[in-house]
Amino acid sequence: MEFIKKRANHAPIEDNVFCVVKLAQEAIQKYGKDQVVDATIGSLYDEDGKLAAFDTVFQIFDAIPKETKARYAGSFTGNESFLKQVYEWVRQNSSLNLPHSAIATPGGSGAVSMVMDNCLDEGQAVVVPEISWESYELMAREDLLEYRTYQVFEGDHFNLASFKQVCRQVMQEQKKLLVIINDPCHNPTGYSMTDAEWSEVIAFLNDCAKEGPVILLNDVAYMDYAFDLEQSRKYLNHFNDISDNLLVVVAFSCSKTMTAYGMRCGAALVLSSSQKNVDDVTMLFEKTARSTWSNVNNAAMETFTTLTTEKKEQFLQEKAKYIRLLQERSQVFLQEAQACGLPIYPFKEGFFLTVKVPQAYVAPYHEALMKENIFAVQVPHGIRVAICSLSVDKCKGLARRMKDVYDRCVK
């Protein structure tokens, strides 16, 4: 087509999540809600099947004057109070202390996209977990980037050997490295790296940075649903050890933290041991913000700021109830999976867990599950189960049913 740029990505978009969500909804209409397991939705639901819209969040949002809701933000980079508070919120319970900046983004996805757009040139490769959120690849392709993956697991722990091998190869080829780590509460497996694993990752990336610039993009979308919130940020302490040639960008999702997904609010936190590096990168990010989305939801930023300062304790108490639900749901599923032998990738916490499936059998296994009115999401080498949207009762018996289908499909 002559209407678009010659190097455009012409492949049609295929979003596995939304396609399967639609199929699940159609099955519910046909067979009834009680006969269908809808484990597709990556949003937090209560035990009655209603989206968890926190009272603490919407009491603040509803009290905001309509003129404030209608108003532009104080700057295209975000409201000053928001930018200060989002950094403090992310670093809480850690000793993170680096030169930094923050840019408001439309959700955490805006931060991820902005990094890919600015940090690599056309044809260069971004390094991404093999099992991951599918939009990473879409974003990379839209920026005409290559896409390299590292294996996430070796047994029951993070695969440092694969991570290092792929990073070394990419650094050797292009003398620059952009690598994504989605942690804690990895989507889709629910794994969180150990302190020792993070220590080794940072030491390794510092070593890579001797050969060229390294950018670590830490996607923390589900951070606030870690089961041990007191410990969930401790790994950030290792960022204090980064070299001048290693830049960290933390992609944070306020809308996920607040379970207000449609508000589309997040932030990119730029961290470096060098203030000049922070300033240089921030200037480019600011231009991207202005030229792409121009402004982030003013009321969402105001809500997040008030929520995490004046109403922090009430918010944490309300959120804690749902974290306990996630723990109960995951425990029910995992205990049953272990009892019946359904293979699961290492899970620690978060919204999702993933059934381990050889890649050749993922599609037929997925199709067979849907014929049994079990709707989940295909990911590389597995099937993602969204325990965030399943009631405890729906979790009971599910692993056993999935194992029965697994035994028929996977040889």
Image: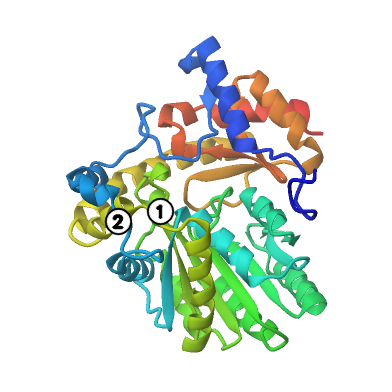
Residue 67 position, x and y percent, is: 22, 48
Q: Earlier in the sequence, mark 1 or mark 2?
A: 1
**Residue 355 occupies which quadrant of the picture?**
top right
Residue 18 got which mark?
Answer: none
Is residue 116 visible from the viewing direction of this image?
Answer: yes
Label 1 environment density (alpha carbons within 10 Å; few <14, some 14–19, many ≥20): many
Q: Which residue carries the number 2 mark? A: 304
Is 244 above or below relative to 84? below
**Which amino acid, by three-letter code, is at mark 2?**
Phe
Label 2 environment density (alpha carbons within 10 Å; few <14, some 14–19, many ≥20): many
Q: Nearer the viewer, residue 343 or 171?
A: 171
Q: Determine the residue positioned at 55% across, 34% down.
A: 40
**Which amino acid, by three-letter code, is at mark 1?**
Cys
SS category of the residue bearing label 1:
loop
State the count of labels.
2
- In this image, 96 relative to 402: left or right? left
Residue 265 got which mark?
Answer: 1
Q: Are marks 1 and 2 in contact (CB under 8 Å)?
A: yes
Residue 258 position, x and y percent, is: 34, 49
The C terminus lies in quadrant:
top right
Is 228 above or below relative to 238? above
